[in-house]
Image (tube, grey):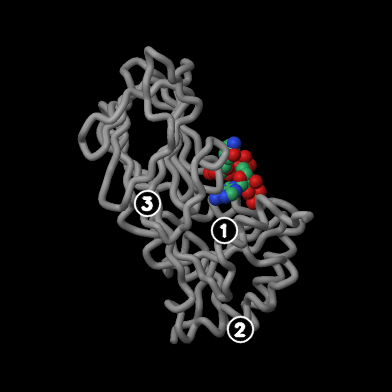
Amino acid sequence: MHPLRYEVVVRTDSVSAGLEAKFHQLAAERGFIHVSQQQDEPPHLIVSIGGDGTFLQAFHRYTEQIHHLSFVGVHTGHLGFYADWKPTELEVLVDSIELARQDWAKSVVKYPLVDIRLESEDGHENLLAVNEFTIKSEDGTLVCQININDQRFEMFRGDGICVSTPSGSTGYNKSVGGAVIHPSFEAIQLAGIAALNNRVYRSLGSPIVLPQHHHCDILPRAGQTLIFTVDHLHMHRSNIKAIRCMVAAHKVSFNRFRPFPFWNRVREAFIGQETE
Ligand code: NAP
């Protein structure tokens, strides 16, 4: 068995920095090798220390390599959806990593991603989102035709559109009225943001969930300057003709060294302790 190669992506606060130093020390004691992005040998494991936002940064730093690495997260704020180890559990985490090396695949769970294909006058661009892709117009109301599986579905007018993964369904998607979806579903969810719906402008007005073998195309009306977000990243574009969204062929891998059911995370994050 090769020694485990790992990298740490850390939030810029002193607590996270302290945990990073402790992680390196514990990892060195077990013979794990710390590699950086510049080195030839790619890491097996990316440890993100901070919050869900830190994981998003880690994911986009290593998007090209997601086929052969996995992530684990330590949260230094409140409970995260992608960061489920507490700072006090660092030693248990490192022991769990060492133990799992004997049957690494057994500890891995895989979550779907959104594949986004931008078609512009300049060509094609491919993006991957682990939470969501959103499109808005800089000029106010976004106007775009939505096709599903190459058939016209509706003409959307409103603030924007959010296309999320199941694991991203608890993020922005939830704030715009989308459903929370278990990450074992290979699906993407399309939710309108403040859709205009009256006698003149009609759209479905409900979020829709597309299975793995379907795709949707968003065709923005010409002349709009568009604002895209892919997770925490923002970009402005004015020459986009079409955006195709579908479930990506590849998933992102996480190491689950102990059970932590998704619905428990949802309850802890959004409901907490209820009084009878
Ligand atoms: P941010 O505005 O600094 O933080 C957004 C919040 O969303 C943070 O509390 C973050 O958790 C949390 N978050 C991230 N992914 C999540 C998920 N899958 N489920 C539940 N909560 C999640 O932005 P950021 O740190 O750059 O993160 C970008 C993400 O924020 C986007 O992908 C989007 O999902 C979310 N967002 C939400 C809204 C909204 O709800 N109105 C608006 C914009 C963006 P941590 O504190 O643990 O990092």
Left or right of 14? Residue 105 is left
Q: Is residue 52 visible?
A: yes
Q: Is residue 232 visible?
A: no
Could you classify mark 1 by the number of other residues whose Cα lies within 10 Å: few (under 14), some (14-19), or many (20 or more)? many
Disc 2 vs disc 3: Cβ atoms closer than 8 Å?
no
Amino acid type at mark 3: Ala
Could you classify mark 3 by the number of other residues whose Cα lies within 10 Å: few (under 14), some (14-19), or many (20 or more)? many
- The residue to which callout 2 is attached is 30
Amino acid type at mark 1: Tyr
Secondary structure type for disc 1: loop
Where residue 27 sits, quadrant-wise, is bottom right
Left or right of 175? Residue 39 is left
Q: Residue at x 28, y 26 (%)?
A: 241
Q: Is mark 1 within 8 Å of ligand 1?
A: yes
- The residue to which callout 1 is attached is 82
Secondary structure type for disc 3: strand
Label placed on residue 159: none
Ranked by sequence position, the earlier of labels 2 and 1 is 2
Give residue 170's position: percent from left, percent from top: 55, 48
Give residue 247's position: percent from left, percent from top: 34, 50
Report, in whole angstroms, how far the alpha carbon at label 2 lies from the one at label 1. 25 Å
Left or right of 218? Residue 205 is right
Give residue 103's position: percent from left, percent from top: 45, 83
- Whether residue 177 is situated above or below residue 31 in the rendered picture: above
Q: Nearer the viewer, residue 23 or 133?
A: 133
Could you classify mark 2 by the number of other residues whose Cα lies within 10 Å: few (under 14), some (14-19), or many (20 or more)? some
Q: Nearer the viewer, residue 35 or 246?
A: 246
Q: Residue at x 48, y 16 (%)?
A: 140
- The residue to which callout 3 is attached is 187
- Whether residue 250 is situated above or below residue 245 in the rendered picture: below
Report, in whole angstroms, how far the alpha carbon at label 2 lies from the one at label 3. 39 Å
Identity of the residue furthest to the top in this view: 200
